[in-house]
Amino acid sequence: MTAKLEDLPRVPRRKILLGKERESFRVSVSAVYVSNPDVSIRDICEVTGRSFGFIYKILIESDVELRSRGGARPLRKDAGD
């Protein structure tokens, strides 16, 4: 069973997550990020209502290996041409 982005809880603004509540949130966020390669940190932010920095910190606390930034890179032209 893969974790789904839609199943993440929405956390009210300025609510401080501590203890078991934070642990539960951390487990669910890291499960979604790890199991879905198409889900970005910004997607998780949008669904949960938390900031990019908070979600980033939660993933780091979970020892999740973060993916590199996506998108195509433009071809680099040589300086000699």
Image (spheres, grey):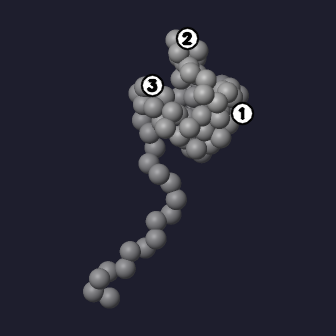
Compared with 77, 30 (above or below) is: above
* Label 3 secondary element: loop
Q: Which numbered disc covers residue 53? A: none
Please name the amino acid that badge 3 sits on.
Ser
Residue designated by label 1: 6
Rate crowding at label 2 as few (under 14), some (14 to 19) or many (20 or more) other CA atoms within 10 Å. Answer: few
Q: Are marks 2 and 1 in contact (CB under 8 Å)?
A: no
Label 3 to label 1: alpha-carbon separation = 20 Å
Q: Residue 26 location, x and y as percent? A: 53, 23
Alpha-carbon distance for marks 2 and 1? 21 Å
Q: Position of residue 34 (x, y in %)?
A: 53, 33
Asked if 34 appears above or below 1 in the picture, the reply is below
Answer whether labels 2 and 3 touch (C-beta < 8 Å): no
Q: Is residue 63 toward the left or the right of residue 10 in the image?
A: left
Residue at the top extreme, as displayed: 20
Report the amino acid beneath label 2. Answer: Lys
Q: Earlier in the sequence, mark 2 or mark 3?
A: 2
Question: Which residue has dot 3 on it?
Answer: 62
Q: Position of residue 7 (x, y in %)?
A: 70, 28
Labels 2, 3: front one: 2
Image coords of residue 39 (percent x, y): 60, 42
Instruction: Indicate the amino acid at tag 1.
Output: Glu
Q: Residue at x 53, y 40 (%)?
A: 52
Count of picture labels: 3
Q: Could you tell me which residue is drawn at 46 percent across and 43 percent down?
A: 67
- In the displayed structure, does residue 58 sit left or right of residue 40? left
The answer to which of 63 and 10 lies nearer the viewer is: 10
**Mark pair 2, 3: CA separation:** 14 Å
Q: Earlier in the sequence, mark 3 or mark 1?
A: 1
In percent of the image, x 56 and y 21: which residue is there? 16
Query: Does the rendering let one see residue 3?
Result: no
